[in-house]
């Protein structure tokens, strides 16, 4: 029996690799998202390896540029001189923007590959232990739900592709139906994933509940969000003391604070398995990466810099400002001292810089193994506080204050006895800067409130070496700010995307 099962699993791998090599036509998924036998980590079965690949490879283009461009630059956290990014800086993103297109395709690739895995597992259900079957379906539905959560918040109505081999030109479905589809996937995942991770970095029931809590919060379903976050708080996840270790030291990947993270693998001979963020973030000309990458493509906006309170312990781990010393960078040269001349905004980002190959054995050109955290425990705490606030201007609720103040205490900041709505969202901005969250946080505040905030944010630059002569740039969002255009290439392939959204058949 064991031999037959092993042979069956290997046959599944071959079949799945074949399925993944042919994406649905309307997705036009790039070849770097195809799986190969080399993707399988050592020491696990072929079946587990297929599921594990969903933790990284189809997400590559999403993470490469899209997440930060949409989540941070579009909302005013980052500045750039780069042409493709500048559309996000100025809130004038067109349907031809390559970053927009790459992210859209990547997210549908996650959906495509999740559906393919489910199809294969369904075909082999009689030969699989029930636990393995339910786990594979749960992982697939969890990943699909996350991809749709980013899609619907970014683009609004999008097609629901619920199975492998669906129609090549699906119509868009109503936003409310997309959210209902996401909820159903996450509810299944919460019921069928294990209580504890089978392997470090794997998702669990509580992780699915955490993402579901954020879906409820996005829809102003505050009671549901509060109930789920309360289930998670005080359990197996906790804040780690060294905030910077979450983003700049791969050996601390999958810490006690990390709940769901993209599991990158830096391999010198492979493309599409790694985190590329360091290459875009490192200040140009500093040699911090030890190679020819490190271009300082996006910089902390002047507005973001001013958001940090004095003595905020997160600031130095988030952005480099004049005189900051980092002994762990260029350590063979005695460390690195930052100087503001390196940046037109007088600062550079520090998050996602891990160093060079001279300091680590997992750094190559545009490649690190630093995880991208999608959900962490501090988010659960701040979501809980926001859910209890429930849209009000302030609260003195003890549970909300306790959750909120845990994040403040870790940052070394004074605790609050009254929590205001503005303070909560300001805390989220500094806590999650460069993690692709700010745009979606603004969206929860509504267009009127967000427009007032964004129009006061300085996203210009300094034109002199002393970084004192400001070239101001203030953005006033349009009425369509919260819904980015669908990529023109997707429309060209599938003109039905221009038709009004239709109801999804849940039967």
Image: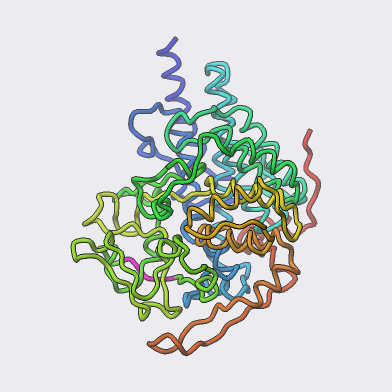
- State the residue in front, 252 or 486: 252
Q: Give the side of residue 270 with respect to residue 159, left or right.
A: left
Q: Residue 492: x, y in percent?
A: 65, 61
- Which quadrant: the C terminus? top right
The answer to which quarter of the image holds residue 282 is bottom left
295 magenta-colored? yes
Q: Is residue 137 visible?
A: yes
Kindly report the secondary structure that dominates the magenta region of the rendered protein: loop
Look at the picture and state if 443 lies above or below 149.
below
Residue at the limit of the structure toward the left, as seen here: 332
Q: Give the side of residue 504 with respect to residue 194, left or right.
A: right
Look at the picture and state if 276 lies above or below 471.
above
Q: Residue 99: x, y in percent?
A: 53, 64
- Please provide the residue range marked out in magenta: 293-297
342 magenta-colored? no
Residue at the limit of the structure toward the front, as seen here: 417
Q: Residue 82: x, y in percent?
A: 47, 75
x 34%, y 55%: residue: 367
Residue at the limit of the structure toward the top, as seen here: 1
- State the residue in front, 319 or 480: 319
x 67%, y 72%: residue: 453
- State the residue in front, 472 or 410: 410
Q: How many marks?
A: 0
Q: Residue 67: x, y in percent?
A: 53, 58
Colouring chosen for the image of the structure: rainbow
Q: Is residue 17 visible?
A: no
- Which quadrant: the N terminus? top left
x 38%, y 35%: residue: 40
């Amino acid at each position: 029996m064991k031999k037959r099962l092993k042979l069956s699993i290997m046959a599944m791998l071959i079949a799945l690799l074949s399925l993944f090599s042919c994406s649905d036509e309307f997705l036009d998924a790039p070849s770097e998202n195809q799986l190969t036998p080399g993707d399988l980590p050592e020491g696990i079965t072929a079946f587990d390896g297929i599921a594990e690949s969903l933790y990284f490879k189809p997400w590559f283009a999403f993470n490469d540029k899209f997440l930060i461009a949409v989540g941070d630059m579009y909302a005013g956290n980052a500045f750039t001189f780069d042409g493709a990014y500048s559309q996000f800086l100025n809130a004038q993103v067109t349907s031809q923007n390559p970053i927009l297109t790459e992210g859209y395709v990547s997210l549908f690739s996650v959906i495509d590959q999740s559906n393919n895995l489910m199809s294969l597992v369904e075909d082999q259900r009689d030969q699989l232990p029930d636990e393995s079957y339910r786990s594979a379906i749960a992982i697939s539905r969890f990943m699909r739900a996350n991809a749709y959560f980013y899609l619907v918040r970014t683009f609004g109505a999008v097609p629901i592709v619920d199975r492998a081999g669906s129609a090549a030109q699906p119509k868009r479905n109503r936003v409310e139906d997309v959210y209902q589809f996401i909820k159903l996937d996450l509810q299944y995942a919460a019921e069928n994933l294990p209580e504890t991770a089978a392997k470090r970095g794997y998702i669990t029931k509580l992780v699915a509940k955490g993402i579901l809590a954020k879906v409820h919060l996005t829809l102003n379903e505050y009671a549901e969000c509060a109930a789920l976050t309360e289930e998670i708080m005080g359990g197996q996840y906790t804040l780690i003391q060294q905030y910077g270790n979450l983003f700049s030291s791969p050996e601390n990947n999958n810490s006690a604070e990390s709940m769901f993270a993209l599991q990158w693998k830096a391999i010198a001979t492979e493309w599409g398995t790694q985190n590329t963020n360091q290459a875009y973030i490192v200040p140009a000309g500093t040699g911090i990466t030890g190679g020819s990458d490190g271009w300082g493509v996006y910089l902390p906006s002047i507005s973001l810099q001013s958001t940090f309170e004095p003595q905020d312990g997160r600031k130095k781990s988030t952005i480099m400002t004049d005189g900051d010393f980092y002994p762990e960078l260029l350590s063979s040269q005695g460390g690195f001292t930052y100087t503001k001349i390196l940046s037109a905004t007088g600062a550079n980002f520090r998050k996602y810089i891990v160093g060079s190959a001279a300091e680590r054995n997992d750094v190559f050109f545009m490649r690190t193994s630093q995880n991208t955290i999608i959900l962490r425990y501090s988010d659960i705490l701040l979501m809980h506080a926001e859910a209890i606030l429930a849209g009000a201007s302030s609260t003195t609720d003890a549970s909300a204050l306790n959750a909120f103040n845990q994040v403040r205490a870790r940052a070394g900041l004074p605790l609050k006895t009254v929590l205001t709505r503005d303070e909560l969202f300001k805390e989220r901005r500094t806590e999650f800067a460069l993690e692709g969250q700010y745009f979606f946080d603004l969206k929860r505040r509504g267009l009127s409130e967000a427009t007032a905030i964004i129009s006061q944010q300085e996203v210009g630059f300094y034109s002199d070496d002393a970084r004192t002569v400001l070239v101001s740039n203030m953005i006033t969002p349009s009425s369509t700010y919260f819904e980015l255009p669908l990529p023109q290439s997707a429309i060209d392939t599938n003109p039905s995307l221009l038709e009004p959204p239709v109801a999804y058949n849940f039967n």
